[in-house]
Image: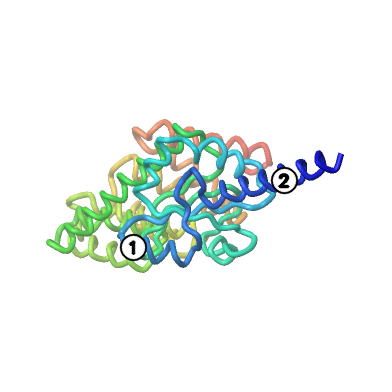
Amino acid sequence: MRARFFRGVMLAAFFVTVGNAARAGGGMVAWRKSLPDAILEAKRSHKLLMVDFYTSWCGYCKKLDAETYTDPGVIRLSGQVVSVKVDAEHEGRELAAKYKVRGYPTILFLNEAGGMEGKIGGYLPPVGFSQRINETLKRHQEFLSAQARYRKDANNAQTAFDLEGFYASQGDGTKAIAMQQQVARLDPQNAKGMLTRSYLYLGDYYSEAGSFDKSTPLYRKVLQVSKVPKEVAYSHLSLAYANLSQNRLKQAVPELKAVQAVPHCPQDISGAAQQLLDRLKGQGVQ
């Protein structure tokens, strides 16, 4: 009986050790031992940093460990990034707050400047996870290429516009603004169609940050300049969302109706406007 008891204790200890090894990277993705070490390695190697935010109680985090991080294809792709796991409730708390991580698992792909170049929210099986890594790596190479083109020729409106989009999506407002100003200088009359699109990039950046006082003027600038149906409709819809987000329901209605009045309005934008109008009507707002 005592032998059976001790065998039970040893087995339990073994499975705990295996579980910890899995989270630390035993036989799976090559997880770095600490966040500071991973950051240093990413900077030295010029690779993206893949940060897996998990918690001890997260069931899908364990599912990701067991099913996805053990997949040979995922393991192979992970060699192109520097991988680290952090407990979002302990050593990773500050980083999770910085990037507004609220659900688990969340996997972020960060560049050397701390810009977020990719995100996986929740569990994905191996095929889907591999696809997302590939997409992120491809976009990262496009970003590096745009940076190289800009260093070679800073007076190319297309390159400045491309970089603005990258910086905006990475949450780097300072650089996104600088690139938008460069686009405005290089295409002041919107002859190349870059100016209005750059307004939209920056407007969306501010909207996602909840800075509607800054996004609204940019969408209105698009309406003053653009003749492109998609840009005009999108700007009206974005103004409607800004009003709705600030609980200004009545002010949203004219913008939504303006979307539907745009000649050759794209169906997806028109449909989104109609859904919002129907919802407001159901609340007695017309």
Residue drawn at x 46%, y 48% is 119
Q: Which mark is residue 210?
A: none
Q: Which residue is mark 2?
A: 10
Residue at position x 32%, y 66% in the image? 175
Q: Quadrant of the C terminus?
A: top right
> Where does residue 197 sit, x and y in percent of width and height?
30, 51
Q: Which three-letter amino acid code belongs to the residue tagged 2?
A: Met
Q: Residue furthest right?
A: 1
Residue lying at 67% horizontally and 43% vertically, measured from the top left: 15
Residue 177, quarter of picture: bottom left
Image coords of residue 13 (percent x, y): 70, 48
Front residue of this view, candidates 39 and 266:
39
Question: Quadrant of the rendered structure where residue 219 is?
Answer: bottom left
The label shown at residue 176 is 1
- Asked which secondary structure carries label 1, the reply is helix
What is the basis of the colouring in this image? Answer: rainbow
| Residue 285 pos. (x, y %) | 64, 44
The amino acid sitting under disc 1 is Ala
Rendered location of residue 125, percent (x, y): 51, 33
Mark 2 secondary-structure assignment: helix
Q: Which quadrant of the view contains residue 234?
A: top left
Are discs 1 and 2 less than 8 Å apart at CB? no
**Marks 1, 2: nearer the viewer:** 2
User: Which residue is at 39% across, 63% downward?
Assistant: 172
Instruction: Looking at the image, tell me whether mark 1 or mark 2 is earlier in sequence order.
Output: 2
Of residues 154 and 273, the one nearer the viewer is 154
